[in-house]
């Protein structure tokens, strides 16, 4: 048998189950055998299809956002491509390893209280949950792909703070954002939608005007008030997004205690696996 054909047979038969088997009549030429193998491969690929997802029931604005192109990355945050927000948030794809870049903004007022939002009921993931000030994704565009000092991510945060919270872009510049570190987490929202992100953590201080399409409600909380909310979440009395809960239970209060001296916590070399 020709070496390329043997390599193909070996590659296919060593894949995860089910194992491909091909009945080859004696005297069959290598070319014909290769055609038989390729036909089997096509059959297997066609048998494993992504389920149909209906989005007719979703909010019109959220449906429009599903077509935005997110930045696909590997587990070390290296860019590997792009895909739609919809595909990036389907559990079907997440279970197969699809990972994208994201950010979480934490904004504090002059009293050093943290602004929380309750996510709109129109959101596809974790609707109605309390979370940090702003959570979204940089897009696969020239300005937001730029990686030096996370400038692309900070530009994306500037864009989304305007869209979600109504802050004019000239009042919330990337230079005002402190990029602390990155976390890698995965969480299912329901049977269809979920999150799998490497999340850039950004801190800043600003006065805001929230957009009700994205935010159901909002409030400033002290450390003690947030701790009480976290306890209520554990008792299932309210819901908090999984990324915000992870950050709050690990790093947030240490950072919060040092808002005027955050440089000591900046870690751009490591990704915290949550």
Image (cartoon, helix red, strand yellow):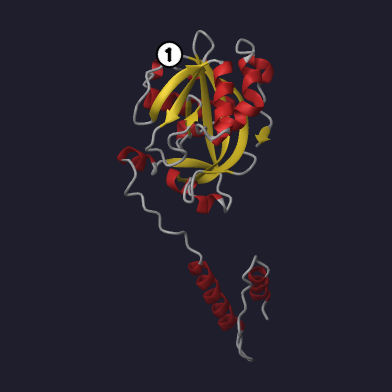
Can residue 79 be seen here?
no
Q: So how many labels did they put on this image?
A: 1
Which of the pair 90/187 is nearer the observer?
Answer: 187
Which of the pair 214/145 is nearer the observer?
Answer: 214
What residue sits 47% from the left and 33% below the top?
A: 129
Q: Quadrant of the C terminus?
A: top right
Instruction: Determine whether 61 is above or below 107 in the image.
Output: below
User: Residue 210, how many percent across, how many down?
Assistant: 38, 22
Can residue 247 be seen here?
yes
Q: In this view, does 218 lie to the left or right of 227?
A: left
Q: In this view, does 172 lie to the left or right of 183?
A: left
Q: Quadrant of the N terminus?
A: bottom right
What residue sits 55% from the left and 31% below the top?
A: 233
Which of the pair 181/173 is nearer the observer?
Answer: 181
Instruction: Determine whether 84 is above or below 108 in the image.
Output: below
**Label 1 element class:** loop
Label 1 Cα neighbours within 10 Å, binned few <14 / some 14-19 / many ≥20: some
Residue farthest bottom in this picture: 26
Instruction: Tell me where residue 4 sits by quadrant.
Output: bottom right
User: Residue 192, how many percent across, how many down?
Assistant: 47, 50
Which of the pair 69/187 is nearer the observer?
Answer: 187
User: Residue 38, how many percent across, how many down?
Assistant: 54, 74
Determine which residue is flagged by label 1: 207
């Amino acid at each position: 048998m020709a070496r390329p054909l043997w390599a193909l047979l070996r590659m296919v038969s060593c894949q995860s189950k089910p194992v491909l088997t091909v009945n080859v009549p004696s005297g069959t030429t290598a070319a014909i055998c290769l055609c038989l193998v390729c036909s089997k491969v096509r059959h297997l690929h066609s048998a494993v299809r992504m389920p149909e997802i209906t989005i007719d029931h979703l909010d019109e604005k959220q449906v429009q956002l599903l077509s935005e192109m997110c930045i696909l990355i590997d587990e070390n945050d290296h860019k590997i491509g792009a895909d739609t927000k919809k595909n990036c948030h389907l559990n079907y794809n997440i279970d197969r390893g699809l990972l994208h870049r994201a950010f979480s903004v934490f904004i504090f007022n002059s009293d050093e209280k943290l602004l929380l939002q309750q996510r709109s009921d129109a959101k596809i993931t974790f609707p109605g949950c309390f979370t940090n000030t702003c959570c979204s994704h940089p897009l696969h565009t020239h300005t937001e792909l730029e990686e030096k000092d996370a400038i692309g991510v900070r530009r994306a945060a500037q864009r989304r703070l305007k869209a979600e919270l109504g802050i004019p872009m000239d009042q919330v510049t990337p230079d005002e954002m402190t990029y602390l570190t990155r976390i890698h987490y995965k969480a299912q929202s329901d049977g269809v939608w979920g999150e799998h992100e490497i999340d850039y953590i950004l801190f800043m201080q600003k006065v805001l005007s929230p957009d009700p399409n994205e935010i159901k409600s909002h409030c400033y909380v002290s450390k003690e008030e947030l701790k009480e909310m976290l306890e209520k979440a554990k008792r299932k009395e309210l819901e908090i997004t999984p990324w915000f809960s992870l950050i709050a239970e690990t790093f947030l209060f240490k950072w919060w205690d040092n808002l005027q001296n955050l440089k000591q916590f900046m870690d751009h070399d490591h990704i915290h696996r949550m």
